[in-house]
Each structure stands twice: as structure tokens, then as C-alpha cells.
Amino acid sequence: MSEEKELNEVEHIKLASHGLRGKIRDAVETQAEEFADDDRQLIKFHGMYQQKDRDRRKDANGDFIENPTSFMIRGRIPGGRLTARQYLVWDELGDKFAGGALRLTTRQSIQMHTIRLTDLRPIMQAVDKVNLSTMGACGDVVRNVTQALNPWGRKDLDQLDEFAQLLSDHFKYKSRAYAEVWLGETQINKEEEEDRIYGKIYLPRKFKIAITLAGNNSVDIYTNDMGFAATLSEDQKIDGYFVFAGGGLGMTHNKPETYPRAADLLGWIPANDLISVAEGIVTSHRDFGDRTNRKHARLKYVLAEKGVEWFRSEVEKRSGSKFDTSKPLPKWETPNYLGWTVRGDGTYSLGFHTLSGRIKDFPDRPLKTALKDIISTLQLDVQVTPDQDLILMGIDKEDREKIETKLRNYKVDPASPKPLYDRALACPALPTCGLALTESERTFPQLLEEIQKVLDKLDLNDRAPIVRMTGCPNGCARPYSAEIGIVGQQAGGKYSLFFGGNPEGTKVGDYVAKKVAFADIPVQLEKAFELWKKEGHAGERFGTFAERYGIDNLRSLLGSM
């Protein structure tokens, strides 16, 4: 760990926070409009960010209006699994406090935006009543654990529920600050015991975990700080895990010491070693992560700079486990969950496509109302997906027609319009995100329409690429692992283009163009697609072609570096 004199400002705030309490409770109880600067960092550990609506508006006199402070709040929902009751509570809170909208995240969670400070406590208490929380959904701790999807009701995938929950619970921080501030718990012990895993200063940066079955990459495992891919015994019980570490997507433009990185495979471990190895990886990040520079603080930099062999040895020493590096890793596939699926018990699931995860009532498409009606009437469990979609589970055969009738009456189509849209992602960006340099979610539909025209023109729909877009380089919508990543670079609508990720998410792409105007993105992509059609092998995906053809050659083709 870096010496205390070298710590960055946020590290000092955490150290002096008295277990993440700061003065958060004072602001809540005095009904302040916003939190003080130090507490703005601490509230992240409670599952929220303080924000401003960055859209500029004028009053009747033509003067700019100062937008009020608002908050984004995010749930801790391991594996994105929700009962009907839990989902409907979020739905009601969205109506009451968030302008009638919810947003599904790439971490299988639910976010709400434009919340007022005085509404935070009622939200926390309502979520707590259905055995959920927002605790640790943000901040320098283990965040929401993602899990492979199971629309098929398969028993092998069902086993992951227990272990996703176990990992989530094990890495919750031990401070009672959350319960005291939001749930009315009285602080009993003024000298709280130091957290065994996180210590007094928590992790250097956020930490993301995914768990899946080996061969199923519906969680984009290589983009996580730590990932577990379960293997099965002959009787189809989990008998071990392939362990991955060091993935992460945030970077800063024009700072080559920051970069996206795909996780490394450390090896295979027996099932009983899951928690000890997970602790070994998390505490290695705690002790060796960079606490002097938050842009260089993720676990990926530890592996990149100290080496995979060193890191593997360090985790073995801490956990007492030994990695088997000889066991072959199965080929990855990303199964399609959209549309109707027959489950193992004879019921159905319905994979509901929701572009960018925004659930609200759009003009002529009352999506939020339709989902509420169906889920509440039939009391359906749901699973949020890492691709910002929603799967409705356990639909009786006789109810399928009822759902289809309701959707027709609402004029809500659950299907993706074209293959291009199936796995397309965009982050919220403007107007609420303070880090956004450009638009993302609000302009993504328009951009996809233009890209679709190019695919139609060149007859490439059968291998439509995975496209993801963000308003800044922090990578929340996983642009770097996509075949095409469109990353906000400069205010005024300038983007960097990344090519070379692949459909199974096993690598990250690289820059091919910088400072591309929004309107020019389809033009640049058409150049690349024409070359792909001409030079690509039969059935070759764009990301595979880009890697084979060469990033430098594609940079020359686009000519905007």
C-alpha cells in the first residue's frame, strides 16, 4: 500500500469518515439540498451519486435557470434476480420519485435518476422492506455481483444463485453507517471494529465480480476485476471454477498509462476454495492497488505491472489454494435470451429487449405500464441482464397468449428491431452524468438507425456487429469489449472509435479514429464495412476481421488519427 503522505484526496476522506458516516446523517436530517464535498464521496458507498441536470434551460426572461441538485440511486441486486414484489417496489419508487422512469444497468441492477435529497431515506426504507438495499452499489468496494442468465430454468445454472448471493454477502462492508443513516438504527459502538477485508480505507477503487458457467459468457466475464466460471461434475454439480482477474474498462483519453484491459485466466480451483481465493484477490487489490492516483487504481494495473505469475503466486499464498493451470478452458458462447423460451419445467420466459435499459412510458409505447401490468397480474419473477434487458420468468403456458394480447393492446413489442440492436448498449451520459463529455443514450437510437442503413445497403445483417456507446472513456457500457466501441472524447460531439473486440467478449479493441464528429460516425463505419465485405472471410464477424486485417491498416483507412 502507498504511504499515507502519498494518498490521494479521496483516500484521506475515507480514512477520516468514521466508517463511511461522515456528516451524511446531518444533511439528511436537516433536509439539506445537497451533501458537502467530502460526503459526496462517501455517499457512493451508500449507493448513490450527487448530480446536476446539465441541460441549460432559460426562464421567460431568457435567463439561464440553475438546475437543482439531484441524485442517482442504484440497487444492490445480486445476479439481477427480483421477485415480482421487489420489481414492483422499484416500479412504484420510479413513479413517485424519479419522474416515472427506471434504468436497467450493465451490472444487472436498477438505477433511478433525478432524486431529491429529502426523498433518499424513504426510498432506502422502501427497498429495505423487500430485503434489498443500495449498500455498496457504488464506491470503492465490491459492487453488484453479476451472474449468468437462466431463462431456460436449467438446474446447472440455478446453482449459481447461491454462489452469487454468497459472494455479494461476503463482501458487504461491515460498517453500520448505512443502517444508521437510512434505516434509523442507533449507533451503539462508537469505536467500530475495523473491517477484516476492507480495513479502514476500503479498496483503492471499485471492484466488479461476475460468476457464470464455463463456456457461457452472458456476463462479459473478461471485463470484470474478478470472474468465476464454474465447472460441473458428472452429476452436474459445481465442482470448481476457472478464475479470472484484472479486467476493467476505464481509461483517460491521451493518457497512455491508463487503458482498458481484458482479465487474465489464473487457473482452476476446487469449489470449496471459492471464498478464500476471492478474498485473496480482493485483499491483493486492497494492499497493492495505487492509492495515489485514482485513474490508475483498478486491479488491472496491478496485474499488468507486476505480472500474472506474480499475482497468481500472491493469491495462492493468501488463500492457501493452488491454481491448476493445465485444465483446458471450454470455448465461450453468448447465448441468446431474447423472445420466448421454453423452460425446463414447461413454463416460459420472455426476454424483453429494452434499448439502453430505459423503462418508462414513451409516446405511443407505454413500456413501463405494460411491464407493471404483466408482472403484477401474473406475479412473475424477473432477471435484469448485463445487456440492459429484462427477462420475465415462470410464465404458465396458458398465460403466454394473455401476455401477447396485453402487449398488442399496449402496442409494445418486446422484440429487438434488428440483430444490430440485440446487444447494443449505451450509457446514460448527458444530462445527468457529471463525467459525460458527449451524448450517448439520447442519440444512440439515431446512430443505430444510420448504422442499420449501412448494413442494409451492404447486405451484412446476418453478422451485424456488436456496437456500444459511451459519453466518456470510463466504459460503463463496455464499449472496448464490443466489436465497435464509440467513446465520447470531446465536448461538442466528438468521439473516438474502437475496433477489435469480439462477439464473445474475450479481448478489448483499440483506437482506430479520434475526434470523429457524431454525424461522421456512419460515414467512417461505412468505409470499414465496405472493406469488411470485400476482404472478409465467409461469415467472418467484424471484430475478428478487424483484428486479422490490422488496427494500423484500419487507422490508415479512416484517416482521422
Image (cartoon, helix red, strand yellow):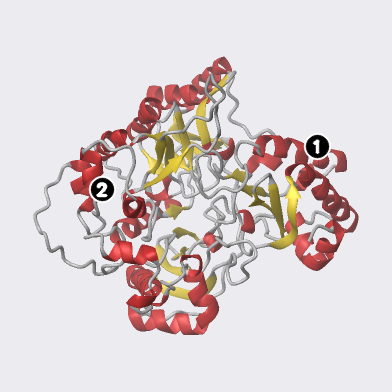
Q: Spatial distance from mark 2 to mark 1, Cα to Cα?
A: 50 Å
At label 2, which amino acid type do we have?
Ile
Q: Secondary structure at mark 2?
A: helix
User: Where 109 sits versus 222, above or below?
Assistant: above
Which residue is outermost to the left?
A: 188
Q: Residues within 10 Å of mark 1 (few under 14, many from 20)?
A: few
Q: Residue at x 53, y 30 (%)?
A: 64
User: Where 66 sits versus 405, above or below?
Assistant: below
Residue 174 is situated, as x and y percent measured from the top left of the image, at 23, 59
- 24 or 163, which is in the foreground? 24
Which residue is outermost to the right?
A: 534
Residue 2 is situated, as x and y percent measured from the top left of the image, at 38, 78
Residue 127 is situated, as x and y percent measured from the top left of the image, at 29, 38
Q: Please state, as top left, top right, bottom left or bottom right, where the N terminus lies in the image.
A: bottom left
- 110 or 138, which is in the foreground? 138
Indicate which disc residue 24 carries.
Answer: 2
Q: Residue at x 16, y 66 (%)?
A: 193
- Mark in the foreground, 2 or 1: 2
Q: Residue at x 44, y 66 (%)?
A: 233
At label 1, which amino acid type do we have?
Lys
To which residue does mark 1 refer?
A: 453
